[in-house]
Amino acid sequence: MNYILLDLEWNQAYFEQAQAVQKRLNCRLRGEVIQIGAIKLSEKREICGSFSTIVRPRYFRRMHRHVAQLTGITQEMMDRGAPLSEAAERFRRWCGTNAVLLTWGPDDVPMFTDNLRAHGLPTDWLPPTYDLQIIYNRQTDGSSKQRSLEYAMQQFGIEQHLPAHDALNDAYFTACVAAKLDLARGIKEYDDRQGQYLDCTVFGDADVGERGFATSEAVLRDARVSDPVCPTCGKPLKKLDRLLHAKGQKYSLLCECPTHGQMMMTLRLVRNLDGSLRAKRMIVVADEATVAAYRSKLAAVAAARTTARRRHRSHRGKKKATAPAAVEQAQA
Ligand SMILES: [Zn+2]
């Protein structure tokens, strides 16, 4: 099996333009891929291939000033790029059938699938995807912090001798970090402990110009939470249980796609700078351990609620003893 380290650069849309395009296409599209960079590692973690291509965007065709500064990709280079259909097909063939995708952080693959969908292209060929940042954390200090690639490179004494924010260079440095890790074990533990992640979306991000949510209830009413769709096929997900509310504005919900099986949707609410809320939604394959942990937490919440209600009831007069039963049913 080959390990493919993928890095993408995308052209950022100006806010109003993104809104107009998303409304027109009726799908999520916050940016358009303009460069695909990838390095292939063999089973022995030796470099055995590289892929780089500039992609011509269809919807956000004007190069964003910041993106140009960051990536060094000019309007002319972008205009001469390959259409996404052609670039994605070449990348698919280059990946081969026996590979997994690794990215630094959770953002690249969701951006890629959003792009493929907006162009009406298939996404089901994408190899299983893992966040190398998580594997790195587990095999170094066990932290849950989002470490930068530069941080990991420094730790392993990897010299930054090529410019950053070029998709191929970034994929190359990600591969250098990956070569220092036990990838086979990392992926196995990933499957065991967390499940393969399928989607990561942030919405209500007022810090980047989106409209934030006033309350957590408003987030939960949002269609992306109340009516989630399968990240792989886009069909509605069936909710299999109740929403679990954990400490620190975290939520999880067990869902199922008729074709792609059980998935766990987790939600984390974070404050924007203006005080409103944004949500980070992850959808992962729900393995047995994840489902068991979720069910036992749900049971614990239900038990705590019953105890609280009994206590509440015993403090009240006998007259109202029948009333709380109705409440319990309504909550069940
Ligand atoms: Zn599905």
Image (spheres, grey):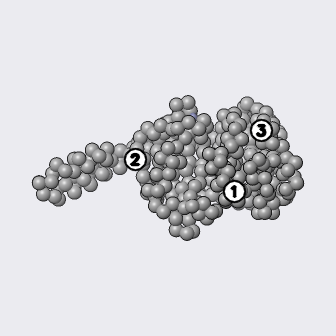
The residue mark sitting in front, 2 or 1, is: 1
Q: Amino acid at mark 1?
A: Gln
Seen in the picture, residue 207 relative to 259 is either above or below; the reply is below
Vertical side of 211 occupied by 197: above or below: above
- Which label number is shown at residue 85? 3
Report x, y in % for residue 81. Answer: 85, 47
Q: Amino acid at mark 3?
A: Ser
Q: Nearer the viewer, mark 1 or mark 3?
A: 1
Of callouts 1 and 3, which one flags the residue occurring earlier in the amino acid sequence? 1
Q: Earlier in the sequence, mark 2 or mark 3?
A: 3
The yes-or-no answer for disc 1 within 8 Å of ligand 1 is no
Residue visible at 19% across and 50% down? 323
The x, y position of residue 182, in whole percent, is 68, 44
The C terminus: image quadrant: top left
- Circle 2 SS class: helix
Judge from the rendering whether residue 195 lies leftward or rightward of residue 104; answer left or right. Answer: left
Q: Position of residue 106 (x, y in %)?
A: 64, 50
Residue 17 - label: 1
Residue at position x 69%, y 35% from top? 122
According to the image, label 2 marks what residue? 297
* Circles 2 and 1: CB atoms closer than 8 Å: no
**Under tag 1, what secondary structure?**
helix
Which structural element holds mark 3?
helix
Given residues 286 and 239, the one toward you in this image is: 239
Of residues 94 and 222, which is closer to you in this image?
222
In the rendered structure, which amino acid carries the disc numbered 2?
Lys
Tell me how far mark 2 sits from mark 3, CA to CA. Answer: 44 Å
2 or 1: tag closer to the N-terminus: 1
User: Residue visible at 57% across and 68% down?
Assistant: 273
